[in-house]
Amino acid sequence: MGEPTKVTGKRSAALQAKIPVTVLPGYHVNSDKPSEEYLIPLKLTWNSTGALKPGAIVYPKPSLEKYEFSEKPISVLTGSFDLVASFKVAPDAPAGPGSAAGTLRYQACNNRACFAPKNVEVKVPYLIQ
């Protein structure tokens, strides 16, 4: 995972942060809406957001791929892509820097098997003007 973009805004402003994700060649992660119930979705959740109020998270459009371990094609993400997280600055936010902290949960798989799910810490730096 790459460094999220730093977001800057004034009180009550709407902001968007890009969170870059790279899946290594030969691997994939399940999309945020997996095609099978037993698959673990890619999911970003916020633990603390400071002066920012979290909004929608936009996940990239997945592709349907067929793998040896599944009878049907499954909804996956491969390569490099961005998650886009929306925030709104609180109307009473103090000026200055901060960060929104969250967790990205994913399950990486190759053509034959899926591995144990992992959680990665995500920090989006911000500056309130």
Image (cartoon, helix red, strand yellow):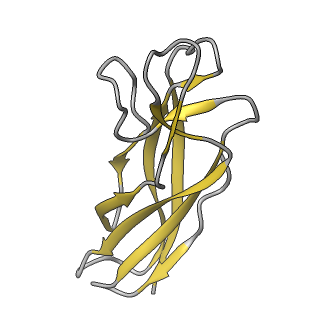
Residue placed at 39% from the left, 33% from the top?
41
Q: In front here: 105 or 88?
A: 105
x%, y% of residue 94? 35, 77
Above or below, comparing residue 74 to residue 115 in the picture = below
Residue placed at 43% from the left, 23% from the top?
72
Quarter of the figure with residue 3: bottom right
Quarter of the figure with residue 45: top left
Above or below, comparing residue 120 to residue 126 in the picture = above
35 horizontally vs 21: left or right? left
Farthest residue, direction right: 25
Q: Quadrant of the N terminus?
A: top right
Q: Quadrant of the C terminus?
A: bottom left
Above or below, comparing residue 52 to residue 32 in the picture = below
x%, y% of residue 9? 43, 84
91 horizontally vs 42: left or right? left
Q: In front here: 116 or 5?
A: 116
Residue placed at 44% from the left, 72% from the top?
16
x%, y% of residue 113? 59, 12
Q: In front here: 90 or 94?
A: 90
